[in-house]
Amino acid sequence: MDTGATLGFVSILPPLIAIVLAFWTKNTILSLGAACFLGVLLAGNGLMGFPDLMKRSLGNESFSWIFLLEIFIGILIAFFQRTGAIQSFGSIIERKKPSRNNIGITTWFMGMFVFFSDYFTPIFVGSTMRKVTDKVRISRDKLAYICDSTSAPVSVIIPITGWAVFISGLLIGMGPIADETTALAIFTKSIPFNIYAILSVLLVGLIVSGLVKDFGPMKAAEDRALNEGKVLSDKADPLISQELTNMEPYYKERFLSFGWNFVFPVLIIIGIAVGTYIFMGSAKTMEAFLGAAVVLGILMRVQGIPVKDIMDTAMNGIKGIMPAIMILVFAYTINTLSEDMGAANYLINSTESWLSPSLLPAITFILAALISFSTGTSWGTFGILIPILIPLSIGFSGGDINSIVLATIAAVAGGGVFGDHCSPLSDTTILASTGAGADHMDHVRTQLPYALTVGSIAVVAYLIIGVSV
C-alpha cells in the first residue's frame, strides 16, 4: 500500500477494537491479539496473514532493541532485589519518616530528574520507589501515573534529549529552517507552547502535594489504598510477575552494600546513557542496562552469591518481565497493521477540510492525540504529521516563523505525547505499569481522566492562540 493509501474507516477498526476490548476484558494481551487477528481478516489477508504480519512487525531492529531492553531491565530489577538493594533503599527512606505527600513529591522529582530517556524513567522510578510507596499506602495506580507523566512529557520539553533531536531533524528544510542549528532553535522556541506536556508534569506535582485532590477512578484507588491498605485492586493482574515482586534477598539477616549494589549500577546506567548522548548524539539506554546488569552480576559473585543463584535470579528476572514483553509483541504488531491499512492517512484526510490558520494548532493537537492514542507511538505520529502540517502552518504565516507555526510544532509534540503516555498500546505506558507493578488497564483507566483534562485545556489554549494571532 502506498504512503497516501487508506482503507477508510476500516483502517482504524483494529486499534479501536483493541482499546475497547482492553477496557472491557481488562486483559490487554488477549485484546491486542484478537484485534490483530480480526484486523488481518478485515484487511483481506486471510488466516496466513497473521503469522506473516507478526514476522514483519517483530523481525526488525526496533523491536529487537526494546525486547532486549526489557530483558536487561528484568534482570537488573531481579539483581536489585536479590542483593537487598531495593529493600535497603526503602529502609533508608523509612528512617527519615517521610509523610505520604513527601514520598509522592520525591517520586515526582525523581521522574523529572531522570529526563534523558522515557524508557529509563518509568522503570527506574517505579522499581526504586515501589516498596516505599507501598509502605505509605500510595496505590500502584498512582505510582504508575507519576512514572508515566514524568517520562515522555518531560523528555519532549527538554531541548537536549533524543526527542528534541528527532523533532528538530524533521523540521529541517521547511520554509526558512535551513539547518540543524536553526531547527533546534525553533523547536526550543516552541517549548513554551507545548501546553499539554508542561501541564501534565505540573499536574502530577499539584496532585502528589495535595494542592489538587484526586478525582475519578484514581480517587477510588487512593481511597482503597489509604483506608484498606490495598495498593492493588482485588482483581488486579500486575504487569510484573511474582518472580520479581516476591523475590527475597540472598542474605536474609543483612543487606549487602547499598552503594555497590544500587548506587554504583545506577551511576553506570546514567553514565552510559548520558555519555553516549553527549558524545554519540544518541542515548544508548539498552546498552546502559546491559552494562549495569553485567557489572552487578559480577559484584554479586564477589560478595559470595553462588553463580547458580545469580543465573537463577537472572532467569527469574526474565520470567518476571514476560507479561510486559507479550503486550509489546502485540502492540508492535497492531501498529504495523494500522500502518499497512492507512489509519493515519484516514484521520488526516478526514480533517483536511477543517484546517484554517485559527484552527490549525487545535486541530493539529487533536489529530496527533488521536493517531498516537490509536497507534501507541509518539515518534511515529511526529514522522507522519510534521512533514504535512508544519509546511502548511508556514504557508499560512507567509513564510515566517510566528506563533501559529510554533504552536503547531508544539501541538504535534504534545498531541504525540498524549497517546504515548496514556494509550494501552504505548510502550512507555507498558513500562510505567511494569515499573510500578500495577495492573496495566487499571493504570490506563485511572490516568486517562487526568490526561483528558489536561488535553481539553490544551485544545482551548490552542484555540485562543489561533484566534489571537
Image (spheres, grey):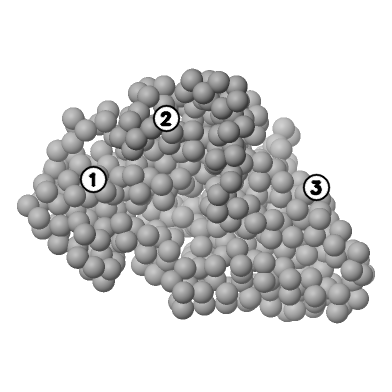
Q: Residues within 10 Å of mark 3 (few under 14, many from 20)?
A: some
3D distance between C-alphas at marks 3 and 2: 38 Å
Does residue 91 appear in the picture of this structure? no
Residue drawn 43% across the image and 55% down it: 153
Residue drawn 83% across the image and 73% down it: 300
State the residue position of label 2: 341
Residue drawn 61% across the image and 69% down it: 288
Q: Position of residue 336 (x, y in %)?
A: 49, 38
Image vertical order of residue 146 relative to residue 292, above or below: above
3D distance between C-alphas at marks 3 and 1: 47 Å
State the residue position of label 3: 242
**Local secondary structure at mark 1:** helix
Q: Residues within 10 Å of mark 2 (few under 14, many from 20)?
A: many
Image vertical order of residue 341 relative to residue 402, above or below: above
Callout 3 touching callout 2 (CB < 8 Å): no
Along the polypeptide, which appears first: circle 2 or circle 1?
A: 2
Along the polypeptide, which appears first: circle 3 or circle 1?
A: 3
Along the polypeptide, which appears first: circle 3 or circle 2?
A: 3
Amino acid type of the residue tagged 3 in the rendering? Gln
Amino acid type of the residue tagged 2 in the rendering? Met
**Local secondary structure at mark 2:** helix
State the residue position of label 1: 389
On screen, residue 196 versus residue 22, left or right, reads left
Residue most extreme to the left: 398
Which numbered tag is attached to residue 35?
A: none
